[in-house]
Every structure is written in C-alpha cells, then in structure tokens.
Image: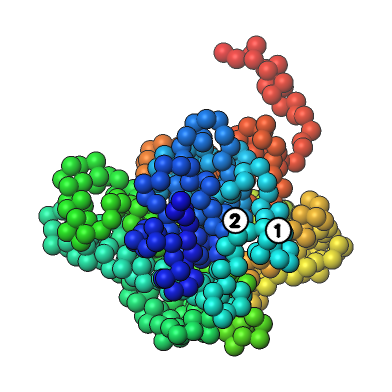
Amino acid sequence: MSCRLVILYSPITSYCKSCISLLSLSKPCLPCITSIFYYATMKSSHTDMCCPVCLFVCPSLSVPPQLISDGSCVYAEALWDHVTMDDQELGFKAGDVIEVVDATNKEWWWGRILDSEGWFPASFVRLRVNQDEPMEEYLAQLEKPGAGENDQPGVGLFLGPGLPCKEQMRTNVINEIMITERDYIKHLKDICEGYIKQCRKRIDMFTEEQLLCIFGNIEDIYRFQTKFLKGLEKRFNKEQPHLSEIGSCFLEHQTDFQIYSEYCNNHPNACVQLSRRMKTNKYVFFFEACRLLQKMIDISLDGFLLTPVQKICKYPLQLAELLKYTNPQHRDYRDVEAALNAMKNVARLINERKRRLENIDKIAQWQRSIEDWEGEDILSKSSDLIFSGELTKISQPQARSQQRMFFLFDHQMVYCKKDLLRRDMLYCKGRMDMDQMEVVDVEDGKEKDFNVSVKNALKLCSLAGDEVHLLCAKKPEQKQRWLRAFQDERRQVQHDRETGFSITEVQKKQAMLNACKSHPAGKPKAMTRPYCDFLLRQKQPSLPSSVPQQQVFMLAEPKRKATTFWQNIGRLTPFKK
C-alpha cells in the first residue's frame, strides 16, 4: 500500500517510490513550512491528510464541500492578518478561529466570526484535523518529551540528517521566505508586463489617469521588491540556510515598505474602476487576452491586484515565525526581532493612513454642511477630527459669554454657532491656528486677563501674544478631556511630520467634489447623516442608540426654563384684524 504523505527533508532515495513521480504536486504546510506531496487522484477526504509535524491540514488543500453540506462545523485558524478592503470581506487577525461556511471556491471561502460573515482568502488560514479539540492541546502534545518518537510516526524523520530540530525549522522558514519572494516578483512582473504594458498600447481604451487608478503604484512596488529580493539573495546562505542573516535586509528597507500605503489606500477605487470596465465585453476580452499572452494562471485581474495588499500583511507573520526558530545566540536574532517590530509598525501605519483617507470625504461633507464658511477649505491643513464638543467662549472687552460648538482638527480648530430654530444647522464663527496657539490650564476663580470669575476654564494664547481665547466647560471631566485632546492633536501633528504623511492635492479636490455632489446648489444645507455617524465614532462618550439623529445636538443644550412668550402671543389673537 503506497503512502499518502512524504516529507521533504532528506535525499530523494528515501521517498516512497509511488511519490517520486509526484514532485510537481508538492504543497507547503505553512505552519511548519514542510513540503507535502499528495495524490491528485486521491478520492478520500483531505482532512485525514494532515502534516505529521504540526498536526494541521495543509491550508493549500481545499475543504471538502461535502463536510459543510452535511452540517458539520469546519473550523480554521487564521495564519495572517486579513485587512478588509471590501464590505463583503471578513477581517480577522492571526490566531482568530473562523467557522468555514462555504468552501466551493478554491481561492476565497465564506466564513463566520461571531456575528460577522464574509469572504476571506483560503491561503490565510489552516484547518484543524480534529475539529472538536482546541489547538492548544496539539501544541502541548508536541512539546511533550518523546512525543515525536512514540505518538507521531514520521516526526522524527523531519529532523533530517545532522541538524537539530530548531535549526531545521529555521531552514524551512528561510527557504519559504525566499521562495515566496521569488514567486511574488514573478507575479508583479506579469502584472506590469502582461497588463499595464498592453494597456498603454490601447490609448483608445485607457487614459493614464485610468491606468493609475486601476493599477496604482504597482510598478514602483515591483521595482522596490526587485531591489529587496537582491538584498535577500546576498544574505541567503544556500549551503546552510539556517545560518542566513536576512533580518538586516528588512531593517535597511523598512521605510521603503511605506509605498504600500498608497497602493492599499487606492485599492478600493481600483476595484470600483475595474468593475465598471468589466461590464463591457470589450474590456473583459482584452484583459483575458492579456492574461493568456503572458501565460498567467487562471485568476481574474482583481485577484492579481489584491496580492500586494495580502503580501504586506504576511511579512510580520513570516518574521514572527523566523524569530520563533532563531536561537537568541544567533547573529541574526536581534535584527530579526527589530525587523518584526518594524514591519508591525509599517502595517499599523498603513492601516492608520487608510483610516485618515477615508475620513477626508466625511470632513469635506462636514464643511459643506456649515453655513457662512469663509476662507480656505478645511482640508488645506487638516485631515482628521481629533475631538468635538460644546464650550462657553468668553470674549473681550465686555467678557461676553457665548455657547459655541468646537471642532478640533489637526492644525486648526473651528467654532460654530447653532441656529436658533434648526438646532442641527451650524454657522461658522471663526477658527484658530493650533500651530500658533499655546494651551493654558486656568484655575477656578477670578481670571486676571478677562477680570471674570471662571470655573473649569482653559485659555488659548497665540505665540505672538495678540490673540487670547477663554473657554469654559460645564464639568471638570469635560475640561480634562479637552486638555487631553489638545495634547493628542500636537502628538498627531508631530507623528505626521516624522512619518511624512500628507494628503495630495488630487485627493483633496476629489473629496471636495464628492461633497459638492452630495449637497446640490439651491437646497438647504444641514448636518448630514454620514457626518453624524462620523462624530459618534470619535473617542468620546457615545450616545444611546435609541436617540434619533436629529436630537444629537439637542442633548448638548442647557436646560432652559419654560417661557410664556407664545402663550402671551396667543392671548392677543382676538385683537387681530
């Protein structure tokens, strides 16, 4: 009886004879980077074809749809973070457990986490052999002494001739990183030469702006990744891969990886632009011809364009796996540890920039909803709302107090007056340049500059000394929250300078254009529903979900005594002509 599995660890003469001819059918087991060979004609369930080293099914092997259709619960564990780029995608972090609901598609599965459902890449997860037993018990079993010799036949063979287990595992991880990098370069080359090069020849079908929207800066990524792979190849020890020192290569290029931010931010727009084109048969046939000419695998263009988004999310997990099997005494240990932190920071930076770019459309809509707006657009300086709320503004020279709504953005703060009848309508009354302001905490009591008694107050003083604003909150907690908000604003401005974050002029114009379309001329402008949702998502006490949106600003109003004005007017009605 021929074996179903054989592990790539030793000379080819040790393989089962029935498997020698199946070298082209190898599939990697990503948890331990073991190469598994299997029969393509095998009709038995794939779930019994687990890797004998890590006891998990290779994620490359598809889930039999029969298991799901029979009502069985099939669970998978996330190997990588999946950053969602679409409403129908299921986002998760490495280590999350996902219930697989539909696996009829080999590339994308439909899964569920708690109350969330959506599509996710099948290659991002691994299946459990025993669906009823938690993963921790498998790992504990592996750590037991002698487990590989008695309980798991074949695990001892994985060590290979002359290498300790940890060094062999490091060899496998290094080899996997190199293989995936080479495959990724080929993938990028196929996109650039197979699609973009052919698209540029058809000026009757594509403009440069359309190509930039669809493909983003993928050509820049291709050039960078080619350079990055050359650096890896120089540090790769072919004879003894476990001695390779590749951590320094990631550190050397950590700032270059930030070019993925632009691509990830543009990807949703690329999907929209591409879907519009694919509604016309001319473009469908053209893209298919490009794929066939380049001899690319049978995946649609939108699937190819998703790869860079997935790739940048895989680096932290690959480095975490490498660090796990690197001895602290290894020369590469500190560099790998630093590289892991650096790539995590890159991923966080990309996510933060994506959030900021999503916000600029909402900020532009907010500006369009404000009456009497004067001066430059809010997006000329700002791209994020830090905090908002109601404060009492005391003005000189008569120390007149006024209730105003304040909106603190990065670099500036805008204050508005509410309409007397329509409380959801705001009128712009001014703004302050926070780059030129200093925040001063004012003690309760008499304030010297304004000669008034104040409570829960703070001052904004211009650095030039020609402008002073005295603001009072209703409660001490609100004052402290505003003081923290001003500190957050300064920290964010400093962080943006250090990371080089900025919004392009094209993005600003597009956001304002979208806002104009949402507020046609001639119609009354009021606080829109998207902006209300935008405010409610900020880091401040949330309102009950039962409160209607039109009452959002009414809750902040101070309670007033009932007036008899309208009753008095009613008594005069008999005297009307």
Q: Quadrant of residue 549?
A: top right
Q: Earlier in the sequence, mark 2 or mark 1?
A: 2
Q: Residue 500 got which mark?
A: none
User: What's the residue type where badge 2 is placed?
Assistant: Leu
- Depth order, front residue of 508/436: 508
Packing grade of label 2 (10 A; few <14, some 14-19, many >=20) is many
Residue indicated by mark 2: 55
Q: Quadrant of residue 495?
A: bottom right
Residue 472 vertical position relative to residue 329 in the rendered view, above or below: above
Residue 379 makes an appearance in the image: no
- Left or right? Give the position of 52 relative to 453: left
Residue indicated by mark 1: 141
Packing grade of label 1 (10 A; few <14, some 14-19, many >=20) is some
Q: Position of residue 258 (x, y in %)?
A: 46, 71
- Left or right? Give the position of 562 relative to 411: right
Circle 1: element type: helix
Q: Quadrant of residue 147?
A: bottom right
Q: Residue at x 56, y 41 (%)?
A: 74
Q: How many marks?
A: 2
- Left or right? Give the position of 184 relative to 412: left
Residue 246 vertical position relative to residue 454 in the rendered view, above or below: below
| Disc 2 from disc 1: Cα separation | 10 Å
Tags 2 and 1 touching, CB below 8 Å: yes
Q: Position of residue 422 (x, y in %)?
A: 58, 35
User: What's the residue type where badge 1 is placed?
Assistant: Gln
Q: Residue at x 49, y 84 (%)?
A: 240
Q: Position of residue 188 (x, y in %)?
A: 31, 66
Q: Residue at x 67, y 58 (%)?
A: 151
- Depth order, front residue of 570/394: 394
- Depth order, front residue of 518/352: 352
Q: Residue furthest right?
A: 445
Residue 333 makes an appearance in the image: yes
